[in-house]
Image (spheres, helix red, strand yellow):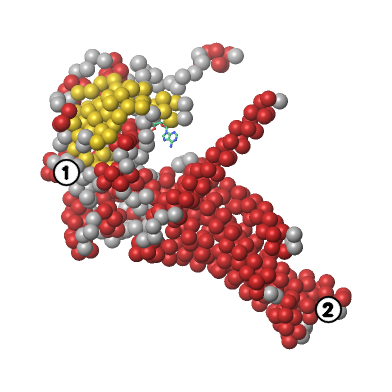
Amino acid sequence: MLDILAVTGRHFIEKLAGFGRATLVLMHALFVWPQPRTSIPLIVKQLYSVGVKSLLIIAVSGLFIGMVLGLQGYTILVDFASEQAVGQMVALSLVRELAPVVTALLFAGRAGSALTAEIGLMKATEQLASLEMIGVDPLRRIVAPRLWAGFISMPLLSMIFAIVGIYGGAVVSIDWLGVYSGSFWSVMQSSVDFYDDVLNGVIKSLVFGFVITWIAVYQGLQSVPTSEGISQATTQTVVYSSLMILALDFVLTALMFGNI
Amino acid sequence: MSVSENVIQISNLKFMRADRCIFKDINISIPKGKITAIMGPSGTGKTTLLKLIGGQLTPDSGRVTVRGSDVHSLARAELFALRKKMGMLFQSGALFSDMSVFENVAFPLQVNTDLDAELIRDIVLLKLQAVGLRGAIDLMPSELSGGMARRVALARAIALDPEIVMYDEPFAGQDPIGMGVLVTLIKKLNQSLGHTSVIISHDIQETLSIADYICILADGEVIAQGTAAQIRESSSEKVQQFIHGYPDGPVPFHFPSVNLMDQLIG
Ligand SMILES: Nc1ncnc2c1ncn2[C@@H]1O[C@H](COP(=O)(O)OP(=O)(O)O)[C@@H](O)[C@H]1O
Ligand SMILES: [Mg+2]
């Protein structure tokens, strides 16, 4: 009994210490005097590898999810003879929920794991140590641009997901199932609110982007510098960020739409 | 030897990793302008020692002074200034994988000096010429062989003309020719640039041939220090075992375990 308590306690303390270290890394990387001349090119480069390279998978997934939503929405709504509301259903589910959450899950798998592996490899091949010996702080040079890039690209990717998804929904409902296009778009326009729906969706994706990159970068930095260590850290990035995304999504949804 | 001649002075250094003691209480002096070799079995903490000298790790007790200043009581900015005087060649080379050979060698100059691009290019060319790889200037690290990567890393380590250059196992995994090239290169650089060299190595013969001064570590202690001749003639059993590579002796080949017979039967 006492053993179980001790083990749980140790586990909890270790997790807490890990969280503390991760917070220090974050503070140290982000709260510095900005040096636009060196940091902007570094951020742009990371925007490419974190954001642009995730674009295809995000767009394709968005298209399919939008099409599925159109199909499912239509079969339910047609029973109530309100199939013209399918536009509203597709748009609201994408903008409020599916775009931020699915984009974040895909982003964690695509960009988050790559970030962890990259930083872990830099650690294992002593690139981080040699930056330090050259007199450059790896947290500023390596970690900070990646954090900013994740933070910036997640909302953009999520918006692209929503737009492509809505287009997919429209193709299915209008061109295939024969919903009248005028009512499809007008119902959608009158029901989606910029602040309540679009802005809240963007806030969600900002939070997710921040959490994923933070987890990814920290996992890379604290990985055991061997091949097993790096692969383990990569897996953990995906597991932890997925759990965090789903848990935070509930909290944020409750705060935004729960009318508490 | 007076203290002023020692660029690096390690006194009563103790260092623990988790609950394992890596260094118990070691004292090493590294004389200025000479080649000092640090030898010892793998896992004794040679790389750790270099990281302690470079201020990347902090000792549990004891002092490391470099050029008269205590590395671990320096402020961050002072430590970074001191590091500009130290070049370090990491075991794996540690070239930045997203930069070309040119960018790798130019990097320390770009971040630590105000030199203009043209001058930096000239310096990079000279450093690459010194390691015989001027022709590889536009290659990426992934296109280099292990030996070439090590030499590019050496060019980067000496880019800022440091006073101290630390080499972490520069000969490991080199073919005989590459090894010969590196040995001559290190010797030549030491003579022509007049810097202090600290070499970590397992390769007894190569090391004995170029080092002015040798220090052997084992079990967290310094088991021998002296010139190559003094080491060869050392009467210590541990030292003899190490330099001749006998499998068994005071330094056991087997990881501590129960008696083999007991384990087979029981
Ligand atoms: N980052 C680390 N965390 C924990 N233990 C480490 C770490 N780096 C090295 N060690 C341990 O410290 C000891 C000394 O390592 P190292 O200095 O690399 O040895 P050497 O270079 O002499 O082969 C080894 O036993 C190694 O397992
Ligand atoms: Mg080593």
Instruction: Provide the chain ID for the residue under circle 1.
Output: B
Instruction: Provide the chain ID for the residue under circle 2.
Output: A
Q: Secondary structure at mark 1?
A: helix
Q: Give the class, few, some or many, for how many residues have Cα within 10 Å of label 1's Cα (few <14, many ≥20).
A: some
Q: Is residue A211 above or below residue A5?
A: below
Work out whether disc 1 and disc 2 sit on a shared chain: no
Q: Is residue A160 above or below residue A43?
A: below
Q: Depth check: A189 or B150 in front?
A: A189
> Residue at 27% across / 39% down in the picture?
B167
Q: Depth check: B107 or B201 in front?
A: B107
Q: Depth check: B17 or B114 in front?
A: B114
Residue A116 x, y percent position in the rendering: 50, 51
Q: Secondary structure at mark 2?
A: loop
The label shown at residue A74 is none
> Residue at 71% across / 68% down in the picture?
A93
The label shown at residue A82 is 2
- Residue B127 appears anywhere in the view: yes
How many numbered discs sit on the rendered protein?
2
Screen quadrant of the C terminus of chain B: top right
- Among the 4 quarters of the image, the one containing residue B175: top left
Whole-number angstrom distance, CA of label 1 to CA of label 2: 83 Å
Residue B59 x, y percent position in the rendering: 36, 31
Residue B123 x, y percent position in the rendering: 19, 56
Q: Are marks 1 and 2 in contact (CB under 8 Å)?
A: no
Tag 2: amino acid? Ser
> Residue at 36% across / 44% down in the picture?
A129
> Residue at 70% across / 80% down in the picture?
A189
- Residue A176 appears anywhere in the view: no
- Ligand 1 is found in which quarter of the picture? top left
Screen quadrant of the N terminus of chain B: top left
Dot 1 corresponds to which residue?
B189
